[in-house]
Image (cartoon, rainbow, N blue to C red):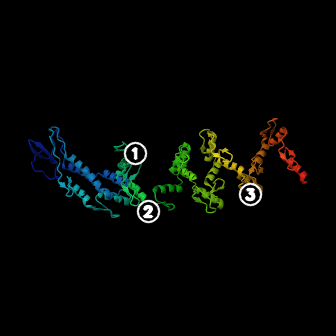
Amino acid sequence: MSSLNYSPLAKEEGVCWTEKESLGLNIIVKEEDDEIPVDGEEEPFGEDDIVKEEEEPFGVKEEEEAIAIKEEEDVLGVKEEETEDEETDDEETEYEKNEDLNNTRERPDTEEPEPETSKPARPHHCSLCGKSFSQLMNLKRHERTHIGDKPHHCSHCGKSFTRLEHQKKHERTHTGEKPFHCSQCGNNFTRLGSLNEHKRIHTGEKPFHCSLCGKNFTWLASLNEHKKIHTGEKPFHCSQCGKNFARLWNLKEHERIHTGEKIYKCSQCGKSFTWLGDLKRHKRTHTGEKPYHCSHCGKRFSQLVNLKEHNKLHTEEKPYHCSLCEQSFKRLGHLKRHERTHIGDKPHHCSQCGKTFTRLEHQKEHERTHTEEKPFQCSQCGKNFTRLEHKKEHERTHTGEKPFHCSQCGKNFTRLGSLNEHKKIHTGEKPFYCSLCGKNFTRLWNLKTHKRMHTGEKAYHCTQCGKSFRWLWNLKEHERIHTGEKIYQCSQCGKSFTWLGDLKRHERTHTGDKPHQCFHCGKSFTEHLKRHERTHTGERPFHCSLCRKSFSELGNLKRHERTHTGEKP
């Protein structure tokens, strides 16, 4: 049996004490390390056991401290030294809980339960705030929060810390040491708390719970950030413009707008950026990386915003609506450009001729008509283009790609504009209206061409002979007369032709195809069906301006006119 020693309260550090109340008296039992427990009783705790249990809560707690520090440094951006006081207070509260548990010992099973257990004494009191501690070193650590004492200094940069473990963790930022290793993915970490947080990614654990909406979070800092959504708290204020932010890092990024600071630099070309995201996107121009993948057609993009815009082609979503005409657009930029058509705003001016444009890209494209610059070259055949979209459309003629798909009939198109025009066949839409005769057109260029019939305008002029034409393709065909260019070649015999129609007629001599059939007699022709039909109808559309005689063929008229002029061919 253990010997009973009756004495006043001894010092806290020496031995562990058990108090009993018996017959109205406080009996103090001192239990030594070398005592042997009686059968039926649990072995009492020795001095080493008690000291160890008290030292571990206040001396280690590395994981909790690391998590707290990481949350404040990495997520919220709060400097370590600004929050050390709060950390210390939280930990001291935890130490006190542990001390309460350690001082409440189990009694033997044979012993009657005590009617009341006295709370362990806390003899160390803070003279500034009155808080009590059971251990002197806890009090000393707490007092540093009042006097701002930071006795631990970084040997590399001189930064000071209230606690030694904080100094050691900080010094790893200089040495690059990452002693904590993830066994699942091989990642290394500077802090144990960071490793424990990282492990939640593998386990899927979300231990932090929002009491307001029930949402769970992997990290405490994420929960704290989330709570600001409910409270509307924005504690970080810009001293320049007064704007408020929920997060410190949002404020710091915003302040770069005022300072013009560009802290992110490309290691390959030296270009600097204000935002980290801009630098990452820029680096993809060097690496060619396209991490964003369309699940519908497989097309890849270097930027997420481009993928989102592209996805609208598949969904037909048009979220941007014009408040003036109710027209809808897939992109915000397209809506803004459209709105300028209502207000007549044309902010972009050609430096050569002064012509104005609603869009900057239109101004630049127009200026190339002055400079004759064609900066976009096809990688397959070397052809140059004034516009990038024209080059891309042209390259599809080499690859055969038709990425634009009609959801109604399944037809595919090389160009988006061709798909949009095709859709009007299904809808019957003719949005382009001639103000002179009231005729409607499916395509804008059809309306513009039609208007030239009213105005007599011939906008395209030959630089060689001055002849004018209504349509550009007429001018280009005419210019081949001067150049002698023959761009259409027969694949069977190699013969070349100036006009596409001539090539098609020639190819029928190889195939024997006679696609033109007379409605009256059923006879088929390679060409000249109309000339043959006049033999049935008696039509004579060619009239002599001198004698009014009529002819069924133009050649006969020309021969007749020579009888008036005396010309000899």
Badge nearest the viewer, 3 or 2: 3
Q: Position of residue 502 (x, y in %)?
A: 77, 48
Q: In the structure shown, which secondary structural element does the residue marked by tag 2 occupy?
A: helix
* Residue type marked 2: Thr
Looking at this view, is 164 or 485 the one in front?
485
List x then y, in percent, for residue 409. 62, 38
The amino acid sitting under disc 1 is His
- Residue 503 placed where, x, y %? 76, 47
Q: Which mark identifies residue 462?
A: 3
Q: Earlier in the sequence, mark 3 or mark 2?
A: 2
- Residue 412 versus residue 475 in the image, above or below: above
The residue indicated by pointer 2 is 259
Q: Position of residue 59 (x, y in %)?
A: 26, 53
- Foreground mark, 3 or 1, reads 3
Quick check: 428 left or right of 536? left
CA separation in Å, label 3 and label 2:
57 Å
The answer to whether residue 22 is left or right of residue 47 is left
The answer to whether residue 288 shows anywhere in this view is yes
- CB of mark 1 within 8 Å of CB of mark 2? no
Specify the amino acid type for callout 3.
Cys
Name the element at disc 1: helix
Mark 1 crowdedness (10 Å alpha carbons): few <14, some 14-19, many ≥20: few
Quadrant, the N terminus: top left
- Disc assigned to residue 202: 1
Between residue 325 and residue 318, name the one nearer to us: 325
Q: Residues within 10 Å of mark 3 (few under 14, many from 20)?
A: some
User: How many numbered discs sit on the rendered protein?
Assistant: 3
The residue depicted at 29 percent of the width and 58 percent of the height is 164
